[in-house]
Image (spheres, grey):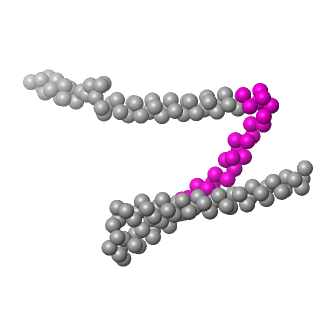
Amino acid sequence: MPMGGVRAFETQSKTSIMSPEIIVPLGFFAVSFGIMYLIVTSRNRERLAMIEKGIDPRVFTEARRYTAIRVGLMAVGVSVGLVLANILVETTALDQDVMYPALSFLFGGLGLIISHFITRKMRLQDEEEERKKG
């Protein structure tokens, strides 16, 4: 009698390898790995081609130099947009389904615009310092 109960439990707990609970996470990780692999290998090939042509590959690191400012100001803008949207939704009859995304995008975009002007000013100062040195 106990054996029958164990068999019934085993047949109920088995899931097919083709079930969505297995395939979807495996597919997600496979696609994520494939994309990361392509990014890394294409970046490596591009840098090797630049070195062969005599171009300095440090151009990529200069572009990432101000990423923290850009991301930080965008995050601050989105946060300000969410807070302002919450205030407007609570104090007025505006629809929250419209206000939260609209103000998040608006202030996030304003943060990116501000970061553009700040990084442009910093780049100009860096170029001026390089001219004085060189």
Q: Residue furthest bottom?
A: 91
Is 6 left, or right, of 74 in this rendering?
left
Looking at the rendering, the stretch of residues picked out in magenta corresponds to 49-75
Q: Tell me the quarter of the picture where residue 45 sits.
A: top right
Q: Tell me the quarter of the picture where residue 53 sits.
A: top right
**Was residue 129 drawn as part of the magenta stretch in this picture?**
no
Q: Tell me the quarter of the picture where residue 41 sits.
A: top right
Considering depth in this image, is 76 or 121 the residue closer to the camera?
A: 121
Residue at screen point 72% across, 28% down: 49
Residue at screen point 77% across, 57% down: 124
Is residue 42 placed above or below 60 in the rendered structure? Answer: above
Residue at screen point 65% across, 58% down: 116
Is 102 left, or right, of 92 in this rendering?
right
Is residue 46 placed above or below 100 in the rendered structure? Answer: above
Is residue 12 placed above or below 130 in the rendered structure? Answer: above
Report x, y in % for residue 13. Answer: 22, 30
Image quarter of the N terminus: top left
**Was residue 71 drawn as part of the magenta stretch in this picture?**
yes
Report x, y in % for residue 31. Answer: 46, 31
Residue at screen point 45% across, 29% down: 30
Regarding residue 72, the answer to whether it shows in the image is no
Considering depth in this image, is 7 or 73 the residue closer to the camera?
A: 73
Report x, y in % for residue 9. Answer: 18, 29
Considering depth in this image, is 61 or 1 the residue closer to the camera?
A: 61
Q: Residue furthest left?
A: 1
Report x, y in % for residue 82. Answer: 45, 65
Regarding residue 10, the answer to whether it shows in the image is yes
Considering depth in this image, is 133 or 22 the residue closer to the camera?
A: 133
